[in-house]
C-alpha cells in the first residue's frame, strides 16, 4: 500500500504542482488505510425489539464500527473488550420502563427508545482467521426472556412496530 501511495505521489509531482500532488498522496494514504482497516472486521447485525422479538439482517460485508444504537442512532451501550472484557456473559436487553428483576448473573442494558439495533464486530487477523471468527460469531445468541426462563416465545411482530406511547409526539414516527 505504501508503495502505491509513494509511486502515485511521485508521478503526480511531474504532472501537477507539488502541493497538490502531496495532498493527493495524503488523501490516498488515508483512504487506503481506512479500506485496509475495514477489511479486518466481520459483522453480525440484529434488529431488536425489547418485547423479545428480533430479526437478523444481512449488513454490508464489512463495517469499521461496533454499535449499540437506539431508534435515533444514539449509541447507548457498549459490550466488548474495552468496557466489559472478553469473558462469556449474559445481558438482559430491556426498554427504559422495565421494572422486573434480571435473572442471576445477567446485566441489564436498558434501551432509551423502545427499538434498537446491535451491530457487533469481531477482529479478523487474516483470511485464514475467518473460520475461527465465524465459529465464534455462531456462539452469539439472542433469546427472549420468556424462553430463557423456560416459557414460550412471544408471538412474532407483524409489520412495522408502533411508536412507544411514552415517546413524545415530536419524536414519534
Image (tube, rainbow, N blue to C red):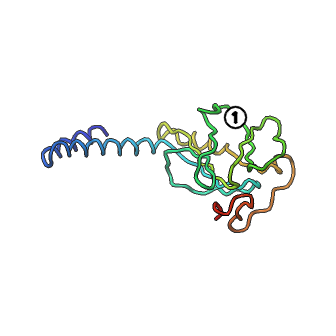
Location of residue 19 (image quadrant): top left
Q: Residue furthest right?
A: 151
Residue 152 locus on image (x, y percent):
85, 55
**In the depicted view, which residue is nearer to us: 27 or 169?**
169
Residue 25 locus on image (x, y percent):
26, 43
**In the depicted view, which residue is nearer to us: 164 or 65?**
164
Q: Residue furthest bottom?
A: 159
Residue 138 locus on image (x, y percent):
65, 45
Q: Residue at x 50, y 48 (%)?
A: 63
The local crowd at label 1, few if under 14, some if 14 to 19, many if 20 or more residues have their Cα within 10 Å, is few
Q: Tell me the SS state at disc 1.
A: loop
Q: Where's the N terminus, which quadrant?
A: top left
Residue 141 locus on image (x, y percent):
70, 46
Q: Where's the C terminus, which quadrant?
A: bottom right
Location of residue 39 (image quadrant): top left
Left or right: where 7 falls relative to 76:
left
Left or right: where 146 falls relative to 69:
right
Provide the residue designation for mark 1: 88
Q: Residue at x 72, y 45 (%)?
A: 110
Q: Residue at x 35, y 45 (%)?
A: 31
Amino acid at each position: 500500500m505504501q508503495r502505491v501511495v509513494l509511486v502515485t505521489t511521485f508521478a503526480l509531482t511531474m504532472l501537477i504542482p507539488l502541493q497538490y500532488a502531496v495532498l493527493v498522496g495524503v488523501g490516498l494514504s488515508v483512504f487506503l488505510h481506512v479500506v485496509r482497516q475495514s477489511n479486518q472486521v466481520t459483522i453480525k447485525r440484529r434488529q431488536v425489539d425489547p418485547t423479545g422479538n428480533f430479526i437478523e439482517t444481512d449488513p454490508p460485508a464489512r463495517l469499521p464500527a461496533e454499535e449499540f444504537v437506539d431508534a435515533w442512532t444514539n449509541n447507548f451501550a457498549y459490550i466488548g473488550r474495552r468496557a466489559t472484557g472478553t469473558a462469556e456473559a449474559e445481558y438482559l436487553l430491556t426498554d427504559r420502563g422495565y421494572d422486573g428483576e434480571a435473572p442471576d448473573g445477567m446485566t441489564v442494558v436498558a434501551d432509551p427508545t423502545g427499538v434498537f439495533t446491535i451491530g457487533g464486530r469481531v477482529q479478523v487477523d487474516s483470511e485464514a482467521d475467518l473460520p475461527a471468527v465465524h465459529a465464534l460469531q455462531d456462539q452469539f445468541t439472542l433469546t427472549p426472556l420468556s424462553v430463557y426462563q423456560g416459557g414460550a416465545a412471544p408471538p412474532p411482530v407483524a409489520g412495522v412496530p408502533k411508536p412507544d406511547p411514552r415517546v413524545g409526539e415530536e419524536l414519534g414516527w
